[in-house]
Amino acid sequence: MIQDPLKRIKNSVWTGLSIGITVPGILLSLVWYLMHKYPFLAKADLLLIGCIAVNAVLMHQFFKLEKDQLGRGIISATFIWAMLFFFYKINP
């Protein structure tokens, strides 16, 4: 079951922040590579948003396990990723 390993994670904001930055970061680096390798994906910014949206799934799982501090850390990381995406979009 997927929830068994999640139960063992320490309920800390810092742990949630690191999970919320690392998981989308890995996905974003993979998507960034694909966007630059294949020209038809160059303008597919929805893929980047999807990578950041993975945090919503993680956050839902941790809130369901009553690990509120982890969820708060993931929310903070999501805002950081959203600001970075915003600056990516406004810069030419």
Image (cartoon, rainbow, N blue to C red):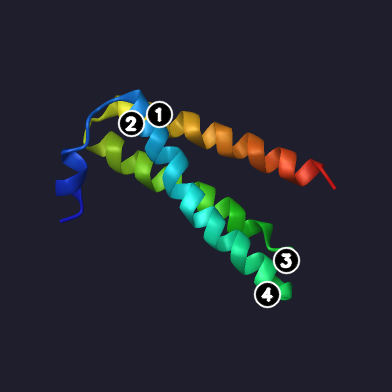
Query: How far apart in space, not on screen, are marks 3 and 2 (Cα)?
Result: 33 Å
Which label is found at residue 38? 4
Give the percent coordinates (x, y) of residue 48: 60, 54
Badge 2, how many Cα within 10 Å: few under 14, some, many 20+? some
Horizontal and vertical percent for residue 89? 76, 46
User: If you read the primary sequence from the N terminus, does the residue marked by circle 4 or circle 1 appear first?
Assistant: 4
Q: In the figure, is residue 24 to the left or right of 90? A: left
Discs 4, 3 touching: Cβ within 8 Å: yes
Looking at the image, residue 89 lies above or below residue 71: below
Q: Residues within 10 Å of mark 3 (few under 14, many from 20)?
A: few
Judging by the rendered image, the residue that carries numbered circle 1 is 73
Q: Earlier in the sequence, mark 3 or mark 2?
A: 2
Circle 4 packing at 10 Å, graded few (<14), some (14-19), many (20+), is few
Task: Determine the secondary structure under disc 4.
Answer: loop
Q: Residue at x 57, y 62 (%)?
A: 31
Q: Residues within 10 Å of mark 1 (few under 14, many from 20)?
A: many
Type of amino acid under label 1: Gly
Earlier in the chain: of badge 2 and badge 1, it is: 2
Residue on which disc 2 sits = 15
User: Please, what is the three-letter code of the amino acid marked with disc 4?
Assistant: Tyr
Q: CA distance from mark 2 to mark 4?
A: 35 Å
**Secondary structure under the numbered disc 1 in the rendered image:** helix
Q: Nearer the viewer, residue 30 or 73?
A: 30
Q: Nearer the viewer, residue 8 or 63?
A: 8
Give the amino acid type for the residue marked by disc 2 in the picture: Thr
